[in-house]
Protein backbone atom coordinates (compact mmCIF):
# COMPACT_ATOMS: atom_id res chain seq x y z
CA UNK A 1 0.00 0.00 0.00
CA UNK A 2 2.34 2.58 -1.21
CA UNK A 3 2.01 6.18 -2.25
CA UNK A 4 4.13 9.09 -3.35
CA UNK A 5 3.50 12.79 -3.77
CA UNK A 6 2.61 13.90 -7.29
CA UNK A 7 3.25 17.37 -8.56
CA UNK A 8 1.61 17.44 -11.98
CA UNK A 9 -1.37 19.58 -12.93
CA UNK A 10 -4.60 17.66 -13.38
CA UNK A 11 -5.22 18.31 -17.04
CA UNK A 12 -8.01 16.43 -18.86
CA UNK A 13 -5.37 14.47 -20.75
CA UNK A 14 -3.66 13.39 -17.54
CA UNK A 15 -6.97 12.56 -15.86
CA UNK A 16 -7.66 10.09 -18.67
CA UNK A 17 -4.28 8.39 -18.31
CA UNK A 18 -2.18 6.99 -15.49
CA UNK A 19 -1.26 9.24 -12.60
CA UNK A 20 2.42 10.09 -12.24
CA UNK A 21 4.71 9.73 -9.28
CA UNK A 22 6.87 12.59 -8.03
CA UNK A 23 9.59 11.32 -10.37
CA UNK A 24 7.26 11.41 -13.39
CA UNK A 25 6.80 7.62 -13.54
CA UNK A 26 3.31 6.33 -14.41
CA UNK A 27 1.43 4.38 -11.77
CA UNK A 28 0.66 0.71 -12.19
CA UNK A 29 -3.05 1.49 -12.25
CA UNK A 30 -4.16 -2.14 -12.56
CA UNK A 31 -2.21 -3.02 -9.41
CA UNK A 32 -3.93 -0.12 -7.64
CA UNK A 33 -7.28 -1.49 -8.78
CA UNK A 34 -6.43 -5.01 -7.61
CA UNK A 35 -5.51 -3.63 -4.20
CA UNK A 36 -9.00 -2.15 -4.06
CA UNK A 37 -10.57 -5.46 -5.06
CA UNK A 38 -8.67 -7.28 -2.32
CA UNK A 39 -9.59 -4.65 0.28
CA UNK A 40 -13.30 -5.06 -0.49
CA UNK A 41 -12.91 -8.84 -0.19
CA UNK A 42 -11.38 -8.39 3.27
CA UNK A 43 -14.36 -6.31 4.42
CA UNK A 44 -16.84 -8.88 3.10
CA UNK A 45 -14.81 -11.69 4.68
CA UNK A 46 -15.03 -9.95 8.05
CA UNK A 47 -18.73 -9.17 7.66
CA UNK A 48 -19.43 -12.85 7.09
CA UNK A 49 -16.94 -14.24 9.59
CA UNK A 50 -17.18 -12.02 12.66
CA UNK A 51 -20.74 -12.94 13.76
CA UNK A 52 -19.98 -16.67 13.44
CA UNK A 53 -16.61 -16.48 15.28
CA UNK A 54 -14.70 -17.35 12.12
CA UNK A 55 -16.20 -20.80 11.62
CA UNK A 56 -16.10 -21.75 7.95
CA UNK A 57 -19.78 -22.64 7.74
CA UNK A 58 -21.49 -19.51 6.49
CA UNK A 59 -18.26 -17.98 5.17
CA UNK A 60 -18.38 -17.43 1.41
CA UNK A 61 -14.83 -16.11 1.01
CA UNK A 62 -12.96 -18.97 2.61
CA UNK A 63 -9.44 -17.82 1.69
CA UNK A 64 -9.89 -14.03 1.78
CA UNK A 65 -7.50 -13.78 4.76
CA UNK A 66 -4.85 -14.28 2.08
CA UNK A 67 -5.57 -10.78 0.82
CA UNK A 68 -2.99 -9.66 3.39
CA UNK A 69 -0.33 -11.76 1.67
CA UNK A 70 -1.38 -10.23 -1.64
CA UNK A 71 -1.04 -6.75 -0.11
CA UNK A 72 2.47 -7.58 1.12
CA UNK A 73 3.47 -8.75 -2.37
CA UNK A 74 2.00 -5.65 -4.01
CA UNK A 75 3.76 -3.46 -1.47
CA UNK A 76 7.16 -5.01 -2.19
CA UNK A 77 6.69 -4.59 -5.93
CA UNK A 78 5.54 -0.96 -5.74
CA UNK A 79 8.10 0.05 -3.10
CA UNK A 80 10.86 -1.22 -5.38
CA UNK A 81 9.33 0.63 -8.33
CA UNK A 82 8.96 3.90 -6.43
CA UNK A 83 12.26 3.93 -4.52
CA UNK A 84 14.91 1.65 -6.06
CA UNK A 85 16.21 4.45 -8.25
CA UNK A 86 16.20 7.15 -5.58
CA UNK A 87 18.87 5.97 -3.15
CA UNK A 88 21.59 8.15 -4.56
CA UNK A 89 19.68 11.23 -3.43
CA UNK A 90 17.52 9.85 -0.61
CA UNK A 91 18.67 8.77 2.85
CA UNK A 92 17.17 6.04 5.00
CA UNK A 93 15.85 8.73 7.31
CA UNK A 94 14.08 10.46 4.43
CA UNK A 95 12.61 7.18 3.23
CA UNK A 96 11.24 6.40 6.70
CA UNK A 97 9.72 9.88 6.90
CA UNK A 98 8.05 9.44 3.50
CA UNK A 99 6.57 6.10 4.51
CA UNK A 100 5.34 7.42 7.86
CA UNK A 101 3.66 10.37 6.15
CA UNK A 102 1.99 7.94 3.76
CA UNK A 103 0.77 5.37 6.25
CA UNK A 104 0.55 6.75 9.76
CA UNK A 105 -2.20 9.37 9.54
CA UNK A 106 -4.75 6.63 8.87
CA UNK A 107 -3.16 4.42 11.52
CA UNK A 108 -3.93 7.19 14.02
CA UNK A 109 -7.48 7.61 12.72
CA UNK A 110 -8.02 3.86 12.93
CA UNK A 111 -6.88 3.92 16.56
CA UNK A 112 -9.29 6.78 17.33
CA UNK A 113 -12.19 4.94 15.68
CA UNK A 114 -11.23 1.76 17.52
CA UNK A 115 -11.28 3.59 20.85
CA UNK A 116 -14.65 5.21 20.06
CA UNK A 117 -16.07 1.88 18.92
CA UNK A 118 -15.05 0.20 22.17
CA UNK A 119 -16.32 2.97 24.45
CA UNK A 120 -19.67 3.76 22.82
CA UNK A 121 -20.72 0.31 21.57
CA UNK A 122 -24.30 0.00 22.89
CA UNK A 123 -24.57 -3.76 22.33
CA UNK A 124 -21.72 -5.13 24.52
CA UNK A 125 -22.14 -4.30 28.20
CA UNK A 126 -19.05 -6.30 29.21
CA UNK A 127 -16.83 -3.75 27.47
CA UNK A 128 -17.92 -1.13 30.03
CA UNK A 129 -16.36 -3.23 32.79
CA UNK A 130 -12.82 -2.47 31.63
CA UNK A 131 -11.20 0.41 33.53
CA UNK A 132 -10.80 3.51 31.38
CA UNK A 133 -7.05 3.88 32.12
CA UNK A 134 -6.52 0.36 30.75
CA UNK A 135 -8.37 1.20 27.55
CA UNK A 136 -6.50 4.48 27.18
CA UNK A 137 -3.20 2.66 27.66
CA UNK A 138 -4.13 0.31 24.84
CA UNK A 139 -5.10 3.32 22.74
CA UNK A 140 -1.67 4.88 23.27
CA UNK A 141 -0.03 1.66 22.08
CA UNK A 142 -2.41 1.51 19.10
CA UNK A 143 -1.34 5.02 18.07
CA UNK A 144 2.24 3.72 17.98
CA UNK A 145 1.07 0.64 16.05
CA UNK A 146 2.26 -1.58 18.92
CA UNK A 147 0.48 -4.73 20.14
CA UNK A 148 -1.59 -4.53 23.32
CA UNK A 149 -3.44 -7.03 25.55
CA UNK A 150 -6.75 -8.40 24.25
CA UNK A 151 -9.98 -6.63 25.19
CA UNK A 152 -13.47 -8.16 25.55
CA UNK A 153 -15.17 -9.29 22.31
CA UNK A 154 -11.84 -9.05 20.49
CA UNK A 155 -10.70 -12.70 20.60
CA UNK A 156 -6.91 -12.71 21.23
CA UNK A 157 -6.01 -10.07 18.65
CA UNK A 158 -2.65 -8.36 19.08
CA UNK A 159 -4.28 -5.04 18.13
CA UNK A 160 -7.62 -5.22 19.89
CA UNK A 161 -8.81 -1.71 19.11
CA UNK A 162 -8.21 -2.10 15.37
CA UNK A 163 -7.13 -5.58 14.37
CA UNK A 164 -5.95 -4.86 10.76
CA UNK A 165 -3.17 -2.78 12.29
CA UNK A 166 -1.26 -6.03 12.89
CA UNK A 167 -0.44 -6.18 9.18
CA UNK A 168 0.57 -2.50 9.09
CA UNK A 169 3.11 -3.24 11.81
CA UNK A 170 4.55 -5.91 9.52
CA UNK A 171 4.45 -3.43 6.63
CA UNK A 172 6.63 -1.09 8.68
CA UNK A 173 9.06 -3.90 9.47
CA UNK A 174 9.26 -4.83 5.78
CA UNK A 175 9.85 -1.25 4.70
CA UNK A 176 12.62 -0.82 7.27
CA UNK A 177 14.25 -4.08 6.18
CA UNK A 178 14.13 -2.83 2.59
CA UNK A 179 15.75 0.48 3.47
CA UNK A 180 18.51 -1.05 5.60
CA UNK A 181 19.30 -4.33 3.83
CA UNK A 182 17.12 -5.64 1.01
CA UNK A 183 17.62 -2.74 -1.42
CA UNK A 184 21.37 -3.37 -1.31
CA UNK A 185 21.07 -6.99 -2.45
CA UNK A 186 21.53 -8.08 -6.02
CA UNK A 187 18.65 -9.72 -7.85
CA UNK A 188 20.03 -13.22 -7.33
CA UNK A 189 20.65 -12.66 -3.62
CA UNK A 190 17.16 -11.21 -3.24
CA UNK A 191 15.77 -14.31 -4.92
CA UNK A 192 17.65 -16.49 -2.43
CA UNK A 193 16.13 -14.53 0.48
CA UNK A 194 12.67 -15.00 -1.04
CA UNK A 195 13.30 -18.73 -1.49
CA UNK A 196 14.41 -19.17 2.13
CA UNK A 197 11.37 -17.21 3.30
CA UNK A 198 9.18 -19.41 1.09
CA UNK A 199 10.61 -22.51 2.75
CA UNK A 200 9.85 -21.07 6.20
CA UNK A 201 6.28 -20.21 5.17
CA UNK A 202 5.78 -23.64 3.62
CA UNK A 203 6.87 -25.21 6.89
CA UNK A 204 4.24 -23.18 8.74
CA UNK A 205 1.55 -24.14 6.23
CA UNK A 206 2.51 -27.80 6.41
CA UNK A 207 2.11 -27.83 10.19
CA UNK A 208 -0.89 -25.53 10.61
CA UNK A 209 -2.74 -26.27 7.35
CA UNK A 210 -3.75 -22.59 7.19
CA UNK A 211 -2.12 -19.24 6.41
CA UNK A 212 -4.72 -17.28 8.40
CA UNK A 213 -2.35 -16.77 11.33
CA UNK A 214 -0.30 -13.98 12.87
CA UNK A 215 -2.99 -11.52 13.96
CA UNK A 216 -3.44 -13.03 17.43
CA UNK A 217 -1.12 -13.52 20.38
CA UNK A 218 -0.91 -17.30 20.03
CA UNK A 219 0.46 -17.11 16.47
CA UNK A 220 2.07 -13.66 16.54
CA UNK A 221 5.43 -15.04 15.45
CA UNK A 222 3.94 -16.18 12.13
CA UNK A 223 3.12 -12.60 11.07
CA UNK A 224 6.73 -11.74 10.06
CA UNK A 225 6.99 -15.11 8.31
CA UNK A 226 4.06 -14.23 6.08
CA UNK A 227 5.32 -10.72 5.45
CA UNK A 228 8.93 -11.67 4.76
CA UNK A 229 8.12 -14.02 1.92
CA UNK A 230 5.47 -11.95 0.16
CA UNK A 231 7.21 -8.58 0.56
CA UNK A 232 10.59 -9.94 -0.56
CA UNK A 233 8.91 -11.77 -3.42
CA UNK A 234 7.36 -8.48 -4.53
CA UNK A 235 10.76 -6.77 -4.49
CA UNK A 236 12.26 -9.59 -6.53
CA UNK A 237 9.37 -9.60 -9.01
CA UNK A 238 10.01 -5.96 -9.77
CA UNK A 239 13.65 -6.76 -10.55
CA UNK A 240 12.76 -9.57 -12.98
CA UNK A 241 9.54 -8.17 -14.44
CA UNK A 242 11.04 -7.55 -17.88
CA UNK A 243 12.11 -11.18 -18.18
CA UNK A 244 8.60 -12.47 -17.41
CA UNK A 245 6.06 -13.07 -20.20
CA UNK A 246 3.95 -9.94 -20.79
CA UNK A 247 0.49 -11.43 -20.19
CA UNK A 248 -2.14 -8.66 -20.28
CA UNK A 249 -5.46 -9.61 -18.71
CA UNK A 250 -6.65 -6.29 -17.26
CA UNK A 251 -8.20 -5.36 -13.95
CA UNK A 252 -11.60 -6.98 -14.53
CA UNK A 253 -10.31 -10.44 -15.39
CA UNK A 254 -7.65 -10.38 -12.68
CA UNK A 255 -10.24 -9.25 -10.12
CA UNK A 256 -12.46 -12.18 -11.06
CA UNK A 257 -9.49 -14.52 -10.61
CA UNK A 258 -8.82 -13.06 -7.16
CA UNK A 259 -12.46 -13.47 -6.13
CA UNK A 260 -12.50 -17.07 -7.36
CA UNK A 261 -9.34 -17.82 -5.36
CA UNK A 262 -10.81 -16.29 -2.22
CA UNK A 263 -14.14 -18.08 -2.71
CA UNK A 264 -12.60 -21.52 -3.25
CA UNK A 265 -13.82 -23.83 -0.43
CA UNK A 266 -11.30 -24.99 2.15
CA UNK A 267 -9.67 -28.30 1.29
CA UNK A 268 -11.32 -30.99 3.48
CA UNK A 269 -9.37 -32.11 6.53
CA UNK A 270 -9.60 -35.65 5.19
CA UNK A 271 -6.83 -34.62 2.80
CA UNK A 272 -3.76 -34.19 5.06
CA UNK A 273 -2.01 -30.84 4.61
CA UNK A 274 -4.26 -30.16 1.61
CA UNK A 275 -5.43 -26.72 2.59
CA UNK A 276 -1.93 -25.57 3.54
CA UNK A 277 -0.56 -26.76 0.21
CA UNK A 278 -3.36 -25.01 -1.69
CA UNK A 279 -2.63 -21.73 0.10
CA UNK A 280 1.09 -22.20 -0.55
CA UNK A 281 0.28 -22.57 -4.25
CA UNK A 282 -1.74 -19.36 -4.16
CA UNK A 283 0.81 -17.30 -2.20
CA UNK A 284 3.90 -18.56 -4.01
CA UNK A 285 2.68 -18.95 -7.60
CA UNK A 286 -0.74 -17.46 -8.29
CA UNK A 287 -0.28 -14.14 -6.48
CA UNK A 288 3.10 -13.45 -8.15
CA UNK A 289 1.56 -14.29 -11.52
CA UNK A 290 -1.37 -11.93 -10.88
CA UNK A 291 1.01 -9.12 -9.87
CA UNK A 292 3.09 -9.56 -13.01
CA UNK A 293 -0.02 -9.71 -15.22
CA UNK A 294 -1.31 -6.56 -13.56
CA UNK A 295 2.00 -4.77 -14.06
CA UNK A 296 2.00 -5.62 -17.77
CA UNK A 297 -1.70 -4.89 -18.40
CA UNK A 298 -2.96 -1.94 -20.40
CA UNK A 299 -6.53 -0.73 -19.87
CA UNK A 300 -9.03 1.68 -21.33
CA UNK A 301 -10.37 4.94 -19.94
CA UNK A 302 -13.39 3.50 -18.06
CA UNK A 303 -11.34 0.74 -16.42
CA UNK A 304 -8.62 3.28 -15.66
CA UNK A 305 -11.10 5.43 -13.72
CA UNK A 306 -12.30 2.42 -11.72
CA UNK A 307 -8.74 1.40 -10.91
CA UNK A 308 -7.86 4.90 -9.76
CA UNK A 309 -10.86 5.04 -7.46
CA UNK A 310 -10.28 1.53 -6.12
CA UNK A 311 -6.61 2.23 -5.51
CA UNK A 312 -7.20 5.49 -3.68
CA UNK A 313 -9.85 4.08 -1.38
CA UNK A 314 -8.23 0.68 -0.74
CA UNK A 315 -6.02 1.65 2.20
CA UNK A 316 -8.70 3.70 4.03
CA UNK A 317 -11.20 0.85 3.61
CA UNK A 318 -8.75 -1.69 4.93
CA UNK A 319 -7.42 0.18 7.95
CA UNK A 320 -10.70 1.85 9.02
CA UNK A 321 -13.40 -0.80 8.53
CA UNK A 322 -12.89 -2.96 11.60
CA UNK A 323 -14.20 -0.67 14.38
CA UNK A 324 -17.53 -0.33 12.57
CA UNK A 325 -17.82 -4.06 11.98
CA UNK A 326 -17.14 -4.78 15.66
CA UNK A 327 -20.32 -2.88 16.58
CA UNK A 328 -22.18 -4.77 13.84
CA UNK A 329 -20.79 -8.05 15.22
CA UNK A 330 -21.89 -7.28 18.77
CA UNK A 331 -25.35 -6.30 17.54
CA UNK A 332 -25.75 -9.64 15.76
CA UNK A 333 -24.16 -11.62 18.59
CA UNK A 334 -25.99 -10.11 21.57
CA UNK A 335 -29.29 -8.97 20.04
CA UNK A 336 -29.70 -12.02 17.75
CA UNK A 337 -31.89 -10.32 15.14
CA UNK A 338 -33.75 -12.34 12.49
CA UNK A 339 -31.70 -13.17 9.42
CA UNK A 340 -33.25 -10.51 7.12
CA UNK A 341 -32.49 -7.80 9.67
CA UNK A 342 -28.93 -9.06 10.15
CA UNK A 343 -28.41 -9.04 6.37
CA UNK A 344 -29.78 -5.52 6.08
CA UNK A 345 -27.48 -4.31 8.87
CA UNK A 346 -24.52 -6.02 7.18
CA UNK A 347 -25.28 -4.21 3.91
CA UNK A 348 -25.61 -0.91 5.76
CA UNK A 349 -22.31 -1.54 7.55
CA UNK A 350 -20.56 -2.16 4.23
CA UNK A 351 -21.99 1.02 2.73
CA UNK A 352 -20.99 2.98 5.84
CA UNK A 353 -17.44 1.64 5.67
CA UNK A 354 -17.06 2.75 2.03
CA UNK A 355 -18.52 6.19 2.76
CA UNK A 356 -16.32 6.73 5.82
CA UNK A 357 -13.24 5.55 3.90
CA UNK A 358 -13.85 8.02 1.09
CA UNK A 359 -14.59 10.87 3.49
CA UNK A 360 -11.48 10.05 5.52
CA UNK A 361 -9.37 10.05 2.36
CA UNK A 362 -10.66 13.40 1.07
CA UNK A 363 -11.18 15.30 4.31
CA UNK A 364 -8.37 13.97 6.47
CA UNK A 365 -5.72 11.74 4.91
CA UNK A 366 -4.88 13.66 1.76
CA UNK A 367 -4.98 17.13 3.42
CA UNK A 368 -2.83 15.94 6.33
CA UNK A 369 -0.30 14.39 4.00
CA UNK A 370 -0.15 17.54 1.91
CA UNK A 371 0.48 19.56 5.03
CA UNK A 372 3.11 17.17 6.31
CA UNK A 373 4.92 17.15 2.99
CA UNK A 374 4.68 20.91 2.60
CA UNK A 375 3.12 20.49 -0.84
CA UNK A 376 2.55 24.09 -1.81
CA UNK A 377 3.14 23.88 -5.54
CA UNK A 378 0.03 24.64 -7.67
CA UNK A 379 -1.84 21.49 -8.59
CA UNK A 380 0.03 19.33 -6.10
CA UNK A 381 -1.92 16.27 -5.00
CA UNK A 382 -1.39 13.09 -3.02
CA UNK A 383 -2.05 9.92 -4.96
CA UNK A 384 -1.69 6.19 -4.37
CA UNK A 385 1.12 4.41 -6.17
Image (cartoon, grey):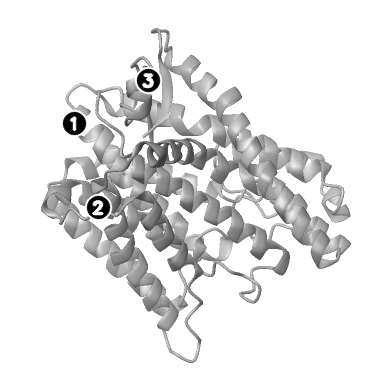
The answer to whether one can see residue 11 in this image is: yes
- Looking at this view, is 125 or 257 the one in front? 257
The reply, left or right, for residue 250 in relation to residue 114 is left
Please tell me which residue is depicted at 21% across the width and 46% down the height of the picture.
238
Measured as percent of width and height from the top left, residue 353 is found at 65, 43
The reply, left or right, for residue 367 in relation to residue 23 is right
Element carrying mark 1: helix
Above or below, 144 against 164 in this view is above
* Cα separation between marks 3 and 2: 26 Å
Q: From the viewer's perspective, is the residue at label 1 or at label 3 nearer? A: 3
Pointers 1 and 2 in contact (CB under 8 A)?
Answer: no
- The mark found on residue 12 in the picture is 3
Q: Earlier in the sequence, mark 3 or mark 2?
A: 3
* Cα separation between marks 1 and 3: 29 Å
Measured as percent of width and height from the top left, residue 171 is found at 42, 45
- The crowd level at tag 1 (other Cα within 10 Å; few <14, some 14-19, many 20+) is few
- The mark found on residue 248 in the picture is 2
- Looking at this view, is 136 or 31 the one in front? 31
Above or below, 164 against 381 in this view is below
- The mark found on residue 85 in the picture is 1
Above or below, 5 against 68 in this view is above
Measured as percent of width and height from the top left, residue 266 is found at 50, 78
Q: Quadrant of residue 96?
A: top left
* Cα separation between marks 1 and 2: 26 Å
Please tell me which residue is depicted at 27% across the width and 60% down the height of the picture.
289
Amino acid sequence: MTSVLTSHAHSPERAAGPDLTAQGKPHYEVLDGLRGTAAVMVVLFHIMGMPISWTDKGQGLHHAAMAVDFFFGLSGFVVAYAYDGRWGTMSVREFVAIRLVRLHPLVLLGAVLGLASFLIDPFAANQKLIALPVVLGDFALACLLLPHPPLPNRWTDTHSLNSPAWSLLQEYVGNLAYALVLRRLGTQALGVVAAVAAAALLSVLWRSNSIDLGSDWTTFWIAPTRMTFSFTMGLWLYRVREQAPAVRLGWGVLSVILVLIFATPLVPRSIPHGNGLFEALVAMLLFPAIILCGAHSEIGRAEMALCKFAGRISYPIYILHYPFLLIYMNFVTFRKPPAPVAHLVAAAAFALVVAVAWAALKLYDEPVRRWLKGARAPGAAVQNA
